[in-house]
Amino acid sequence: MDLKSCPDCSQLTAADNDACPYCGYVFELPDGRSQPVALASRRKERKRDSRNPLLAAACAFLFPGWGQWYNGRTAEGIYVIAAGSGIVIVSAMLMFMVRGSETILMAIAAVAGLLLLVLWVYSITTAYNTARGINRGGTAFTGKSLLFWMPATLWVLFFGVIVIVVASLIIPGLPGSDIPATISHVGGSVALRANGFLGV
């Protein structure tokens, strides 16, 4: 069977195919004319539902499970978060139970850290591979999960708080700009009382 390479995704497909089965690219006819409008609209639909593998991996890097929600895998993202939460809770309980032994505490922390690292890498790789599978047409895409916006909101709030705090430290007169001075004054007063300089 004759094969040809798709100029869009570089995958090999049958030479008589009108469109690439992996990415939806519509091949041109030998005389340079494009395929019928129906095929072009199918390609546009496939492009609209495509996922960015790098963006999916970046989401999973910042928040395990976020990349799965970006790909529309709501349950899989919940499983990743539940597994990470379970590791943290179980390790904390074990560390509380054997808090007298420093060696055992370090061993529990090391095992928990290793499991969380494996889960983190798993979330990144599966998010990336799922996005590629969606683009190739081998994996169904039912739309971005609504839970996708939860980590996005948390990151926006996090950076917003950082911007406000930094701005209050740099620009005088903003609400909260006197907090560092107040803390410094209170700290100095506590230090003076501790050294017997204040008769309070």
Image (cartoon, grey):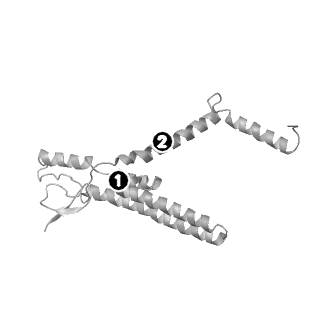
At 61% from the left and 64% from the top, the residue drawn is 96
Left or right: 169 as drawn, with respect to 112 = right
Sooner in the amino-acid sequence: mark 1 or mark 2: 1
Q: Residue furthest front?
A: 97
Q: Position of residue 154 (x, y in %)?
A: 47, 44
Q: Residue at x 27, y 55 (%)?
A: 135
Check disc 1: other Cα within 10 Å, few if <14, some if 14-19, many if 20+.
Answer: some
With 18 as the anchor, is 78 left or right in this view?
A: right
Q: Quadrant of residue 11?
A: bottom left
Q: CA distance from mark 1 to mark 2?
A: 21 Å
Q: Amino acid at mark 1?
A: Thr
Q: Which residue is mark 1?
A: 74
- Name the quadrant containing residue 175: top right
Q: Quadrant of residue 4?
A: bottom left
**The N terminus appears in which quarter of the rendering?**
bottom left
Please say if 177 is above or below 21: above
Q: Nearer the viewer, residue 22 or 91?
A: 91
* Image coords of residue 34 (percent x, y): 14, 48
Seen at 68% across and 32% down, the residue is 178
In the image: residue 9, left or right of residue 185: left
- For label 2, the SS is helix
Residue that label 2 marks: 156
